Image: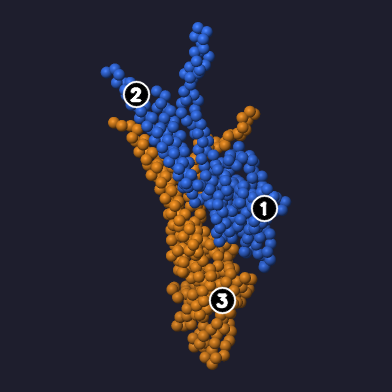
Amino acid sequence: MMRSLYSAISGLKNHQVKMDVIGNNIANVNTTGYKKSRVTFSTMLSQTLQGASSAGATLGGTNPMQVGLGASLRSIDQIMTQGSMQSTGKPEDLMIQGEGFFVLTTNGTDRLYTRSGAFSKDSAGNLVEPASGAKVVAANNTGTIKIDPDVYTSFTVDKTGVITGIKKDGTSEKITDMNIQIATFPNPAGLMNQGGSFYVESNNSGTVKRYGEGATDGSYPAGTKLISNTVEMSNVDLSEEFTDMITAQRGFQANSRVITVSDTLLQELIDLKRG
Amino acid sequence: MRLLGTAAGGIRAQQVALDVDGDNMANVNTTGFKANHTNFAETLATEMRSANVTMNGQPVGKSLSMGAGVLYNGIGTDFKQGAVKTTDRPLDVAINGSGFFEVTTANGEKAYTRDGNFQVDADGNLCDSNGNLVTLVDEGGNEMPKGNLLLTEGLEIDSNGTVTAMVDGERMSFGQVALALFPNQEGLLKLGSNLYGVSPTSGEPQLVSPGTEGTASLQTKALEASNVDLAANMTDMIQVQRAYQMNSRMVSYGDEMWSIANSLRR
């Protein structure tokens, strides 16, 4: 059967995936700490009708003659750029300005990474991710952040991740071993998406580095700081998504035309033989 | 009956043309894709009467020859620049001008691409999104060792292709992304996955530094879009469709005429 028919099908499928990714980006346009993805395509194998020949004594060389067989998905990349900040006035809301991720744990030993710092406190004073209840891991990577409600009425977090508790009598003190950890990866785009704004390590994300006061790699790297009372907004740019959506729609349409034309050609062939 | 063979040849040729158009259309959003087009040529003509025939010393007339249809004799690639589309990703690189990035594939062979969607893997290699290693060269033009970006942060590529990254708070250079130029880039073999390979007609690649005089410059945080022109491709497809239809009509007419000849004697 015709190559063009299958090239067009590959084009249709790819553009559908592109639409899926755009749809997901737009759905997360207001998700705190969301990082957008984008799709890239590549060519498929080509069928060689005639190979290249090198130049001879009297004749020049000829170029190869190859028919491409369509397109395939090449990558779905996560774009890890900074989102803008949104001030909330809630002391548990934290945002990372610069590289890195908050570290969370659900059972004490597992490690989840997220850019979404919209945390809350539970009844025991643990700083948790409100949807899942995962606790925020401290810089020393052993404990989790807990602000004892019997001792402290409120707290503040400074830009280096140090937590200061305010006691009932109005005095304040630094809470020891309760510093927010920020983790970085050599290849953050290699992290696996886990849902719930969580990422987990993959074998292409590289070795994790842990920062914060009392952490293995020292205090936060240059250019990274914590901002409290704010959350990081999604880095989805609607104007970009909509233009991408036009591209996807038109690309899809063009490929569907190739299918209808291929179909009429086949019909033409069938009509050749009457009776 | 030459007509049937001529028309069948026409159908075959238009079929290839549609295949090429379909492939272009499928790759309308493929990074760094270059559109292809089919070239046709006439086949050898049969001489029905030679020019040198004489009768009683008088020349009979001009030669009479009849063609036997069409051949596709080439599929050319149009290497004109695609639109440079900005992205937010620091490791996206577009080539503004001619040349190719050089990568090493899994089997150790060199391949060439216009797709600059790069990443750093966990082992500290700059690679494309299929994991093919991008060739980085030092000032002397020698290839940098594998994994030289291990333990670095904040990788950046500038318009000259120089790769810099932070090591212990200091920005250091880690080589340059080289561009490969070919004597005949239309002769490159298409390997799929946006890669091209050296062929006997392409000639050997010459590695040059981007951004110097007479060479292409790089644009970071950008990718080169496909250079397929949808309007041109769509009109091309209409032409192909009609030419195909015409050739198939000729087969029908040929069939009909043959049937008439067959029924002369009942």
Q: Is residue B22 above or below residue A14?
A: above
Query: How many residues crowd around disc 3 within 10 Å: few (fewer than 14), some, or many (20 or more)?
Result: many
Say what amino acid the circle numbered 3 marks.
Answer: Ile
Q: Tag 3's secondary structure?
A: strand
**Residue at numbered disc 1:** B211
Q: Is residue A57 above or below residue A130?
A: above
The percent coordinates of residue A102 (x first, y second) are 53, 72
Frontmost of labels 1 and 3 is 1
Quadrant position of the N terminus of chain A in the picture: top left
**Residue at numbered disc 2:** B258
Frontmost of labels 3 and 2 is 2
- Whether residues under marks 3 and 2 lie with C-beta atoms below 8 angstroms apart, the answer is no
Colour displayed for chain B in the image of the structure: blue
Say what amino acid the circle numbered 2 marks.
Answer: Trp
Quadrant position of the C terminus of chain A in the picture: top left
- Can you name the residue that lies furthest to the left here? B266
Between the residue at mark 1 and the residue at mark 2, the CA separation in whole angstroms equals: 66 Å
**Residue at numbered disc 3:** A227
Q: Chain of mark 3?
A: A
Q: Are marks 1 and 3 on the same chain?
A: no
* Residue located at (55% from left, 61% from top): B88
Say what amino acid the circle numbered 1 marks.
Answer: Gly
Colour displayed for chain A in the image of the structure: orange
Rendered image quadrant of residue B125: bottom right
Q: In screen coordinates, is A259 left or right of B89?
A: left
* Residue located at (59% from left, 55% from top): B93
- Can you name the residue that lies furthest to the right here? B140
Q: Which mark is residue A67?
A: none
Model colouring: by chain
The foreground one among B193 and B15 is B15
